[in-house]
Amino acid sequence: MFPPSSTVDSEEGLLDVSTAPTTPDGSLTFSPVLQALKLRDALEEASERRHNTRNGSGALDATLYEPVVGIGGVKNICCVGAGYVGGPTAAVMAFQNPHLNVTVVDRDPGRIAQWKTKHVPIYEPGLYEILRIARDGSRASSFINEPSRADSLDSMSNVSSSSSECESQCGEHADEIYISGRVPNLFFSTDISKTISEADIVLIAVNTPTKLRGLGAGRATDVTALEAVAREVAIHAKPGAIVVEKSTVPCRTADIIQDTLKIHRPNLAFEVLSNPEFLAAGTAINDLLHPDRVLIGSSNTPAGHLAAATLASVYVSWVPRHKIITTNIWSSELSKLVANSMLAQRISSINSISAICEKTGADIDEVAKSIGLDPRIGNKFLRAGLGFGGSCFKKDILSLVYLAESLGLDEVAEYWQQVVTINEFQRARFVRRVVKCLNGTLVGKKLTILGYAFKKDTNDTRESPALDSIKGLIEDAPSEIAVYDPCCIPSVVKQEIGRLLGKEVLKENGGPVEVYADAYRACHKAHAILIMTECDEFKNTRISSPNLHPTQKLSSRMKSDPRPFQRLEPTGSEILALHSYLTRTVSMADALQWFEENPECKPGCKACAEEGNVGLVVDKGKENERLDWARIAYHLQRPKWVFDGRNVLDIAEMEALGVRVEGIGKVGFAGR
């Protein structure tokens, strides 16, 4: 928060917050967030330095970690919740704000212990590289800005070659770039109360699932964990701490938090903000580094506006000012639910059309492409498949349904409920199609599930379509259901299936389900393969590209692809190249010199011994490795069936291998 006499920069000069003009309701007539951003600009300008190298040639000081004083003097941030939102969000915040101490707390000691090792509990491309730098610190290093390389990395650098007297590519006037080391500023702890008591900002990023019992069961959001955190914050937070909702919550949840704070600390005033995340599993790090927007909701008071400006001062370290949007707190909470619901609506809409395509002979890919060219519609989220999964879409739609019902808007509730209904219909229809093509019976047959996570490039299995399909297939008594996912640990998948479907379904207990660490073993002698996740590994077309340096690969993709992590898991050098792009410098010739050593695991580490754990270890060396479908097809049982639930295969190529393919929204072999 601003001290009473604080001033901030504006286009007109310095503004005194304490004497700023106000509207009749007491709110400021100028934007505190704008003040925060202007202040950040001034600080950035002041921190720019240029030095000479020891040999006298022109050198560029690329010290990336000049401390930036936030509007409210923020020094410590506490993130409660070490899950899919809290962990990556805290890592990027710490990575981009080395002057801040960011601590992630969780009541699960096992999860916290994992975050301190190389076996992090969450797989996201790019996460581990950022984690290594923020959690472990980095070494001071230097490298030469080679003109020939800088030329190929021009999209990643705003550094002008004018610092060199010669603009040729001879390398004689190459700049030496120095990057200072940094100390760790990302920590993990189970001491929740102590960490909260030291924090200037407390982020709440706990799980908010759908209620399973009681009033609103199956629709309403269960805020039990959030209530527990709110009590901890109310008891232990220091005066003036800012409380931030990162979890997806029902509209007006801030009232619950504020009421809890007042009950326990009636003589103190705390500001509660809504700052929902807009992350997609598989691209979460890129979404954090390049957000479409950062939404901050606050109370419409001077104190609320200043709290929003303080939080904005954390984001402006790397987020462009125009992408930071402020609203009232209720709009922010509702915006998250509506955003997810409308994205899910598009998926259900195109999937409903896929059923029509299969009956009429139309091709869903051609239909989606033609309507996606309409600028009023666009091509996003129009890819037909098995429907949406994950922890957000279904839960948030049901929360919106419950909100509409509680407001007496039954027609609105029914409309959004249908989005979920179509999603369930799509999954059930896929299973029926499999059984029908296999002569109406699965008895004595082996089926292989490729992809268990709900989408590619993640080990998040919540609301996975694969689990629903396995449940449906088991009813027809197949001899085996083999499961493989490139990003999931087999023992974890097996444990989850046993917990959700019953241990009796596992092969070791006499059931049909077996989880494999090797795709070829999983597919061996199968009667049918079911592709449930759109992993690049499962595609049967190869992308031909020249033999480029890893940073050049990333650079070439960044020119045309705003989400560079979508197709390739970045190595350490690539993530540093991306960071260099963000901080207006050039890539390192030997990026790994910046990293500290990996933390050593304790003797007898189960994760180290786990077969198939490659998905959770950085630099696994299998970037873009595709399955050899000729090898798989050779060992399939005749007739050879593949049911492509994500439309990732080239059907003509598969048929050339003697494989019958049934895709979503396409007339397959059985319908010809």
Image: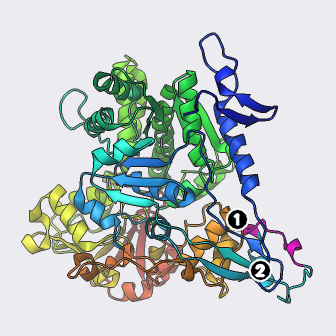
Please say if 235 is above or below 619: above
Residue at x-position 41% and y-position 42%:
202
- Residue 95's x, y, as percent? 53, 61
Look at mark 2 in the image and give the residue it sits on: 53
Instruction: State which mark lies toward you, 2 or 1.
Output: 2
Q: Which residue is mark 1?
A: 560
Q: Is residue 510 visible?
A: no
Q: Quadrant of the C terminus?
A: bottom left
Distance between mark 2 and mark 1 Cα atoms: 35 Å
Q: Name the quadrant containing residue 402.
A: top left
Residue with the most extreme front position: 5
* Badge number at residue 360: none
Residue 66 position, x and y percent, is 64, 59
Q: Quick one: label 2, few (<14), some, or many (20+) residues within 10 Å?
A: some
Q: Position of residue 124 (x, y in %)?
A: 44, 65
Q: Secondary structure at mark 1?
A: helix
Magenta stretch: residue 461 in it? no
Give percent across and percent down for residue 293: 60, 44
Which of the image's four quarters has the N terminus? top right
Q: How many marks?
A: 2
**Residue depicted at 30% across the width and 39% down the height:** 229
Which color scheme is applied? rainbow
Q: Which residues are magenta?
A: 155-164
Q: Amino acid at mark 1?
A: Ser
Query: Would residue 162 be counted in the magenta stretch?
Result: yes
Q: Residue at x 66, y 80 (%)?
A: 142
Pick the residue in front: 353 or 437. Answer: 353
| Mark 2 residue type | Thr
